[in-house]
Image: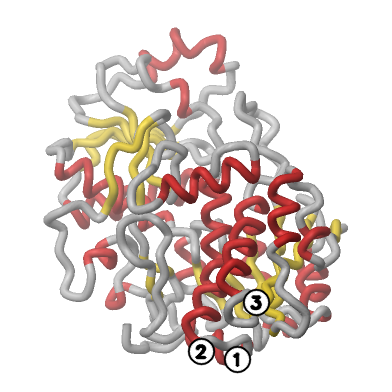
């Protein structure tokens, strides 16, 4: 079952704070402007029953970023006689995402941002209705989507797990903390992040000196002080790297380990696309505009959805066209690049559809560093030191194009 919001700018933003909804409405282009419709298909899985988070995500997490991006695109678009319209459909956790995509396709949307789990993204690319459309994977980090399951009609805005792990590994190696204790959660996605960490260790000279899988079934909130010191006893290491994507136990590791060591990975020092303390390279202005509109800080999910919409907006502004075929061709050309307020322009890896991008390394209340780290070189661009490079790719469905 899907929840559908009508495609007018104001109604698309009806669930958002009044300031953001009015901002989108006021930026609507004049009559006669060329319309560029962008579908937004979102599906948020239910958290596992064993996980409780003290920081519940906002109801508009992700969507608020997309709506702000439409407003930003219309700011430029009004000078180019272009009108951007967001067309959102929300899919229930157990809903039919395929039906939602067919609905957006029937409305004529040629660009569809997909904010959904990796399995959903992979299934949508195979639908007949996806042909001739550009799907933008906003938040699924699965390396398989960039590898064996890649698709010619799919671009990746979110960094992959390999990119996140590489960003963290570069920093730890640069700090001369190469000996790692890897703790992996019980869920499949945790194992995938752990695999990315192992790969990063081999690439950059890290050494995983110990590994354990979290199996405690008691209430870690009540028993952490007793269980974690025992669980974290291991041979000498520099950093404990945790793979716990849903937050089942990782937040309880810091300050409770048997040896006094920093924690990094999915908790502690975290590789991410965005953080509320990030202010460099114009990020402070984006943070302020988002907070004024949405009445809360921008999250990584918001920023990924903002970036996905802005890919289309940037292509329209630079090509001065609203023709979907022309925009798709420009986005996938070597000429495409855009800013995302992270110190280097984003551009497209032609071999797997991944956006090259810097990755932030952040603690809870501070930005610590940005990868790629200085000294990690590449013949094309240092951004290609993060994730799978062209000689490594398993993607066969896009062809081996020039970068």
Residue 24 percent location from the top left of the image? 70, 59
Image-based side of 166 in relation to 149, left or right = left
Q: Earlier in the sequence, mark 2 or mark 3?
A: 3
Which sits in the foreground, 6 or 119? 6
Image-based side of 399 in relation to 154, left or right = left
Residue 348 percent location from the top left of the image? 40, 75
* Location of mark 2 (residue): 329
**SS under mark 2:** helix
Tag shown at residue 111: 3
The image quadrant of residue 116 is: bottom right
Image-based side of 161 in relation to 221, left or right = left
The image quadrant of residue 271 is: top left
**SS under mark 3:** strand
Question: Which residue appears at 54% of the width and 44% of the height?
Answer: 298
User: What is the spatial separation of the Cα atoms under label 2 and label 3, in whole angstroms?
Assistant: 12 Å
Residue 161 percent location from the top left of the image? 42, 54
Tag shown at residue 325: 1
Looking at the image, what colour scheme do you see?
secondary structure
Circles 1 and 2 in contact, beta carbons < 8 Å:
yes
Tag shown at residue 213: none
């Amino acid at each position: 079952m899907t929840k559908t919001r009508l495609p007018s700018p104001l109604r698309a933003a009806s669930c958002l704070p009044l300031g953001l909804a009015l901002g989108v409405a006021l930026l609507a282009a004049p009559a006669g402007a060329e319309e560029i419709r962008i579908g937004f298909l979102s599906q948020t899985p239910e958290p596992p029953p064993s996980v409780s988070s003290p920081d519940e995500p906002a109801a508009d997490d992700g969507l608020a970023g997309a709506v702000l991006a439409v407003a930003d695109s219309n700011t430029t678009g009004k000078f180019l006689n272009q009108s951007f319209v967001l067309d959102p459909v929300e899919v229930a956790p157990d809903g039919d995402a395929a039906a939602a995509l067919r609905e957006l396709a029937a409305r004529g949307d040629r660009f569809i941002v997909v904010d959904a789990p990796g399995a959903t993204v992979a299934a949508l690319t195979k639908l007949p209705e996806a042909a001739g459309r550009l799907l933008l994977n906003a938040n699924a980090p699965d390396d398989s989507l960039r590898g064996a399951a890649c698709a010619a009609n799919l671009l990746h805005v979110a960094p992959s797990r390999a990119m996140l792990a590489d960003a963290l590994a570069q920093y730890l190696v640069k700090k001369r903390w190469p000996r790692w204790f890897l703790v992996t959660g019980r869920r499949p996605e945790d194992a995938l992040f752990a695999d990315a960490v192992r790969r990063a260790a081999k690439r950059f000279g890290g050494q995983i000196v110990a590994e354990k899988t979290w199996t405690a079934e008691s209430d870690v909130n009540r028993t952490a002080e007793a269980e974690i010191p025992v669980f974290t006893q291991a041979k000498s290491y520099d950093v404990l790297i945790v793979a716990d994507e849903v937050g089942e136990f990782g937040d309880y590791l810091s300050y409770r380990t048997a040896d006094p060591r920093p924690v990094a990975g999915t908790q502690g020092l975290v590789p991410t696309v965005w953080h509320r303390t990030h202010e460099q390279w114009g990020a402070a202005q984006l943070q302020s505009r988002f907070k004024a509109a949405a009445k809360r800080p921008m999250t990584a999910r918001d920023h990924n959805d903002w970036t996905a919409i802005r890919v289309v907006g940037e292509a329209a502004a630079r090509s001065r066209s609203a023709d979907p075929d022309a925009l798709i061709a420009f986005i996938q050309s070597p000429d495409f690049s855009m800013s995302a307020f992270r110190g280097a322009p984003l551009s497209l890896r032609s071999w797997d559809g991944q956006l090259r991008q810097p990755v932030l390394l952040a603690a809870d209340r501070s930005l610590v560093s940005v990868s790629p780290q200085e000294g990690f070189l590449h013949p094309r661009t240092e951004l290609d030191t993060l994730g799978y490079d062209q000689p490594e790719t398993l993607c066969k469905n896009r062809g081996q194009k020039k970068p």
